Structure formats: structure tokens, C-alpha cells
Image (spheres, rainbow, N blue to C red):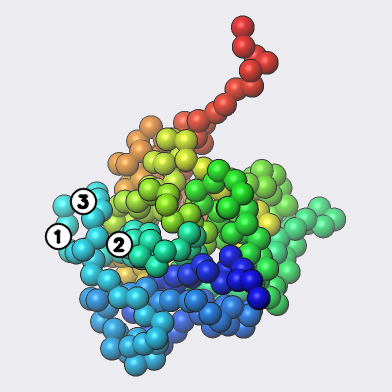
């Protein structure tokens, strides 16, 4: 029996301090994906022994200080998820994997999104192996470096929101299907995803998030450990400023929310991604 692309593609779940609660792992198992899944943790995780006792055969442990990166600040301590993200490229290469999937550890539902009778609807998946296969196939047969599934915040505004209208957006967050040989590095202690896709987007690299497939997760600051402590300690202003520092011509600060406003980054997409003008306009 021939192996599928998914059978040969490692799935890396990035986790920290959540040995007792592995939502993504449980959700994948419920949806029919049980093989080739690894939990990626740093050797400074305070719960590392609990991880080893419970998930020893799934663990991929790395040392943050072995990872070369730019945290974009002068704090000596290494923290955040950026080291784990960069380690995944090295790990996939060492495993001779042509592609890899990078996930966070707190997904509880995988959805399909669609518009019906003018309203944005959703349907929960009962199986996602074929959808993971299709995502990898899309990655393999296009010039994309990365293909992503959407998240809840992408659909603020419902059926008339920009994500639904565009169907694809030049951003890359959360659920990643990567080509291993793409020389991408994440940067910045926080907001490393926005820093990455704005930086490489201006260089013409293609990373797309689609409006048809989506994951759901709890609000970042409502769950313990993971990135919650960083966001709680430094707030969303500091988080967004990393992206302003990285790409000041592309990213600015704005207020986000309805009744309870918070500082968030705003990407000027006209300044971010190169535009190719049709030759029919050539004089």
C-alpha cells in the first residue's frame, strides 16, 4: 500500500507548561489523526518530567540557547514560542521530511466555514485526514511557502468580513503547513508570526490563510501557561510594538474591539506584499 503525503509528514504541536492539558492532541485523535504527532517542548519547561511520564514517545526536546534567532530586545532570558517555531524547521530537516505541520496546543474544534442565506455558517469536522492531505497537496503543487488554516478572529464581521470576501489572505498564523526547505525564520519575542509574514511578505514570499478551514481555541489570556504569561506580563501594546519595530513602514498601532478596546497591530497590506501589474498596461 502506497504511503500518503500525510503519512510522511510530521505534525509538531508546540507546547509549554501544559502537560496535563493537550487539547490539540486530543482533538486530532478524535478526528482520526493518531500517527506521526510530536510534542515540541524546551528543556526549561517546568513540567518536563510530567511530559516525559505521560508522553515520552511523542516528545521532541530542544534547548532554546541552541537556536539562532533575533528576539528584537535586550532581555537576557529567552522566552516565548519563537525558539520552538524555528526549531521545527531544523527538526523536520533532520527527519528528512519534505513538509511539516506546525500547530499550537490549544485547539478544541476544527471547522468548515461557508456562507448560506447571507449568513456565515460553520460545520464541525468528524474527520480531517483528507483535509490535511488536501492542504499538503496544495502546498506541493503551488509556489507557496506556507498554507494556513484560519482562526476565529479572522471572521469578525460575519459573512461580510474581509476574510470571506477575499477567500485568501497573505498572512500566516497558528495552523501552518510548511515546506521544509523554505528558509524562513521567525523573529521577535512576541508577535513572531506577524513579524515573520510581514517581513517575508515584502520580499515576495507567498504565505496564505484560507477562509474555508478554521480552528477554534480559547482566548489566549484565559488559559494557563503557554503564551499567556508573556501577554499578561507585557500586555498587547508591547506585543504589537515588536511588529512596528520590525516593519515600521508596514505595521502601525490601532485600537481593536467593541466595548473594551485594546491596542493591536494594523498591517498596511498595500505596503506589505508586492503587486504584479498585468503586461497589458505596459506602454
Q: In the rendered picture of this protein, how many numbered marks are placed on residues?
A: 3
Q: Residues within 10 Å of mark 2 (few under 14, many from 20)?
A: many
Residue farthest bottom in this picture: 53
Give the answer, above or below, for where 146 lies relative to 26: above
Asked whether 162 or 140 is in front, the reply is 140
- The residue tagged 3 is 73
Which circle marks residue 222 in the picture? none
Residue 162 horizontal/vertical position (percent): 64, 45
- How far separated are the C-alphas under marks 1 and 2? 14 Å
Q: Which of 7 and 136 is in front in this view?
A: 7
**Residue annotated with mark 2:** 83
Label 1: how many residues lie within 10 Å, few (<14), some (14-19) or many (20+)? few
Distance, label 3 to label 1, CA atoms, is 9 Å
Q: Earlier in the sequence, mark 3 or mark 2?
A: 3
Q: Which residue is drawn at 29% across and 56% down?
A: 189
Q: Nearer the viewer, mark 3 or mark 2?
A: 2
The residue that disc 1 covers is: 76
SS assignment at label 2 = helix
> What x and y, as percent, mark residue 135?
62, 59
Q: Which of marks 1 and 2 is nearer the N terminus?
A: 1
User: How many other residues sit within 10 Å of disc 3, few (<14), some (14-19) or many (≥20)?
Assistant: few
Q: Left of 25 or right of it: where is 242?
A: left
Rendered view: 35 above or below 100: below
Q: Where is residue 13 in the image (x, y as percent from the top left)?
A: 44, 72
Residue 222 visible in the current orientation:
no
Which residue corresponds to the image point at 35% horizontal and 51% vertical from the top-left? 185
Q: Where's residue 1, x and y in %? A: 66, 76
Residue 29 shows up from this direction: yes
Amino acid at each position: 500500500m502506497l504511503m500518503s503525503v500525510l503519512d510522511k509528514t510530521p505534525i509538531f504541536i508546540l507546547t509549554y507548561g501544559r502537560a496535563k492539558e493537550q487539547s490539540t492532541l486530543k482533538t486530532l485523535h478524535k478526528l482520526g489523526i493518531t500517527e506521526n504527532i510530536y510534542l515540541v517542548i524546551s528543556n526549561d519547561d517546568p513540567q518536563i518530567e510530567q511530559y516525559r511520564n505521560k508522553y515520552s514517545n511523542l516528545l521532541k526536546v530542544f534547548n532554546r540557547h541552541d537556536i539562532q534567532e533575533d528576539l528584537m530586545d535586550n532581555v537576557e532570558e529567552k522566552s516565548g514560542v519563537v525558539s520552538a517555531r524555528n526549531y521545527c524547521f531544523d527538526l523536520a530537516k533532520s527527519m528528512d521530511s519534505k513538509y511539516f505541520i506546525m500547530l499550537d496546543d490549544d485547539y478544541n474544534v476544527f471547522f468548515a466555514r461557508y456562507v448560506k442565506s447571507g449568513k456565515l455558517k460553520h460545520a464541525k469536522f468528524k474527520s480531517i485526514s483528507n483535509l490535511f492531505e488536501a492542504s499538503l497537496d496544495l502546498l506541493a503543487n503551488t509556489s507557496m511557502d506556507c498554507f494556513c488554516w484560519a482562526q476565529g478572529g479572522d471572521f469578525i464581521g460575519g459573512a461580510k468580513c474581509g476574510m470571506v470576501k477575499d477567500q485568501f489572505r497573505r498572512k500566516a498564523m497558528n495552523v501552518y503547513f510548511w515546506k521544509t526547505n523554505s528558509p524562513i525564520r521567525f523573529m521577535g519575542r512576541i508577535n513572531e508570526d506577524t513579524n515573520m509574514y510581514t517581513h517575508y511578505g515584502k520580499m515576495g514570499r507567498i504565505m496564505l490563510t484560507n477562509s474555508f478551514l478554521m480552528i477554534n481555541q480559547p482566548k489566549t489570556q484565559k488559559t494557563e501557561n503557554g503564551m499567556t504569561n508573556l501577554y499578561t506580563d507585557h500586555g498587547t501594546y508591547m506585543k504589537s510594538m515588536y511588529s512596528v519595530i520590525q516593519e515600521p513602514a508596514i505595521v502601525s498601532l490601532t485600537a481593536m474591539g467593541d466595548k473594551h478596546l485594546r491596542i493591536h497591530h494594523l498591517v498596511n497590506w498595500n505596503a506589505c506584499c508586492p503587486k504584479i501589474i498585468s503586461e497589458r498596461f505596459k506602454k
